[in-house]
Image (cartoon, rainbow, N blue to C red):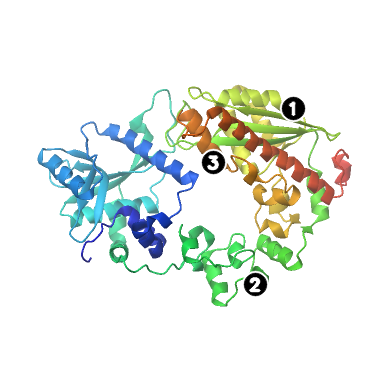
């Protein structure tokens, strides 16, 4: 695989598969790589915590706590020479320039050879996890180890905590890694060779070809390589576009959505998006919109939850990555147009927020009137889980779902389409059209990932970053959640105007029912 000048790690290998130019940049010009977003930081913290817990399954384990690859490899060999049978962070380097560190290296029960166990903070043995473990296997084999088996240790989504944590019950094992990797051996080894060649050529950065990919598949250094890339209403902005369809239009030289070829099929939302762009006007299907607003009953309870997830369940009855509400905001709109606000924010790290939140919600939402949300699938599922956790309030909580109206449907079902939506049904794209003064960018906490991260730092971890005061963070959290429900009120009022309905007009009559 060439002469070693730098070591190819698992991270480099995955960076290469994302984009060779990104792989090279992360190795030779890391200052050009943007910092990880909040959700990635949180995921890395989760992985560290899960790995630390998994080590408790191996009480005889010896950890190699050395960063330098060569020194870590020497310490691994010394541990083996001393008779260690389980090693955490076991390290190898190869003459060709490969470097791997196994989460757990365990002597095979026969005494001959080793097993590799990779620990993952996920609830399935997915493609990436198996590829990760296979990379480790191939490097250890090249380093001279006899690898008898490879497993992925992952979280069991069926696990329910009952009192203290049952570590054995928390994990499942994927034992099919070796056969999976053997079936893809040539492809994986080719990618390893390609990645190694890229990072060992410090003078030549390969081209970034992410300009041919959908937004979700672009590398983090895309803007470094394509600073003048066209933005605004391009084919890359088409809602739900896939790689195959994108490649088809790019091959024809089409860049802007208004030039979309008539013979390439579109789904309804894509057609609405392009139609709005071409006309430059919003599209309003008044009859459908009047029927939609006619479903709502006063008082209207505009509800939004903020939730957190942890890979290791914190409370009895919860499971890995359960979405647990810690906050809600409710704006109550009455038939006379008056507005009331109610809210809840849990800040006690040592107690489960579920029952207090459910009881507060019971006090804040009456038995009559619609419950209006943005994306029924999320809030509705949370209500079902709350009902399971607080059975004495189950009738109320499940009743909220029976009264629920999904405000997002007005956009996602094409009753109202605006050129500025960009095909999105996200409230963060819709609200600026209605109330541009309510920009999320003006908030200290302006999106859900940061809200969850900040709450977790201040409450669960009890260790906010330097310069972050918990009381201030809690006020910012309240402001963010409050804006979500107030934003829904403003959108609702706008929909009423588009439908020709006055707020306070009997909605059954407005919908033509009666």
Q: Which residue is mark 1?
A: 367
Q: Residue at x 60, y 43 (%)?
A: 446
Q: Are marks 2 and 3 in contact (CB under 8 Å)?
A: no
> Counting residues from the N terminus, which is met first, the one under dot 1 or under dot 2?
2
Quadrant hosting residue 486: top right
Cα separation, mark 3 vs mark 1, equals 33 Å
Q: Which residue appears at 37% of the width and 36% of the height?
A: 49
Instruction: Please identify, in this view, whether the residue under mark 1 or under mark 2 is nearer the observer.
Output: 2
Write down the residue under mark 2.
Answer: 260
Q: Give the x, y percent position of residue 432.
A: 71, 50
- Residue position marked by numbered label 3 in the rendering: 450
The percent position of residue 65, horizontal first and vertical second, equals 24, 39
Q: Is residue 98 left or right of residue 429?
A: left
Can you give x and y, in whole percent of width and height, for residue 77 in the image? 14, 45
- Closer to the chain start, of discs 3 and 1, is 1
- Is residue 323 visible from the viewing direction of this image? no
Circle nearer the N terminus (2, 3): 2
Check the image and report above or below for 117 versus 316: below
User: What distance separates the C-alpha of mark 2 from that of mark 3?
Assistant: 36 Å
Q: Nearer the viewer, residue 427 or 470?
A: 470
For the residues labelled 1 and 2, say whether their Cβ atoms are less than 8 Å apart: no
Side of 65 where 223 appears, left or right: right
Secondary structure beneath dot 1 equals loop
């Amino acid at each position: 695989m060439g002469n070693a000048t730098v070591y190819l790690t698992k991270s480099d290998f995955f960076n290469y598969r994302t984009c060779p130019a990104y792989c090279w940049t992360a190795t030779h010009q890391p200052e050009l790589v943007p910092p990880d977003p909040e959700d990635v930081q949180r995921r890395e913290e989760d992985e560290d915590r899960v790995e630390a817990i998994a080590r408790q399954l191996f009480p005889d384990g010896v950890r190699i706590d050395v960063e330098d690859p060569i020194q870590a490899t020497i310490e691994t060999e010394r541990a083996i020479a001393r008779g260690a049978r389980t090693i955490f962070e076991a390290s190898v380097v190869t003459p060709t320039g490969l470097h791997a560190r196994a989460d757990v290296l365990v002597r095979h029960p026969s005494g001959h050879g080793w097993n590799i166990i990779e620990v993952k903070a996920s609830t399935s043995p997915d493609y990436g996890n198996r590829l990760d473990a296979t990379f480790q296997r191939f490097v250890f084999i090249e380093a001279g180890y006899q690898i008898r088996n490879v497993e992925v240790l992952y979280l069991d989504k069926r696990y329910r905590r009952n009192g203290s944590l049952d570590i054995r019950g928390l994990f499942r094992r994927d034992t099919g890694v070796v056969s999976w990797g053997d079936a893809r051996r040539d492809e994986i080894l080719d990618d390893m060779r390609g990645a190694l060649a890229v990072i060992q050529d410090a003078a030549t950065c390969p081209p970034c070809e992410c300009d041919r990919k959908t937004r979700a598949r672009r590398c983090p250094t895309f803007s470094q390589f394509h600073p003048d890339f066209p933005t605004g209403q391009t084919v890359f902005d088409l809602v739900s576009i896939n790689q195959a369809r994108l490649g088809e239009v790019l091959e024809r030289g089409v860049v802007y959505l208004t030039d979309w070829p008539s013979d390439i099929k579109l789904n309804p939302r894509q057609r609405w998006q392009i139609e709005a762009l071409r006309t430059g006007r919003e599209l309003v299907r008044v009859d459908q919109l009047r029927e939609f607003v006619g479903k709502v009953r006063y008082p209207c309870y505009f509800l939004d939850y903020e939730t957190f997830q942890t890979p290791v369940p914190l409370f009895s009855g919860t499971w890995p990555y359960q979405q647990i509400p810690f906050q809600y905001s409710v704006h109550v709109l009455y038939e006379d147009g008056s507005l009331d606000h109610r809210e809840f924010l849990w800040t006690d790290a040592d107690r489960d927020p579920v029952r207090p939140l459910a009881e507060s919600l019971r006090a804040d939402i009456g038995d009559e009137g619609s419950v209006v949300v943005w994306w029924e699938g999320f809030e509705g599922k949370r209500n079902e889980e709350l009902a399971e956790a607080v059975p004495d309030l189950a009738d109320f909580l499940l009743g909220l779902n029976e009264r629920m109206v999904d405000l997002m449907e007005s956009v996602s079902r094409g009753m109202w389409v605006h050129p500025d939506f960009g095909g999105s049904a996200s409230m963060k794209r819709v609200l600026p059209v209605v109330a541009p003064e309510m920009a999320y960018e003006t908030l200290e906490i302006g999106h859900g990932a940061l809200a969850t991260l900040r709450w977790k730092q201040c409450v669960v971890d009890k260790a906010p970053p330097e310069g972050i005061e918990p009381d201030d963070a809690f006020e910012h959290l309240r402001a963010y959640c409050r804006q979500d429900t107030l934003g829904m009120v403003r959108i609702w009022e706008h929909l009423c105007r588009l439908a020709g309905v006055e707020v306070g007009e009997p909605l059954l009559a407005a919908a033509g029912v009666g």
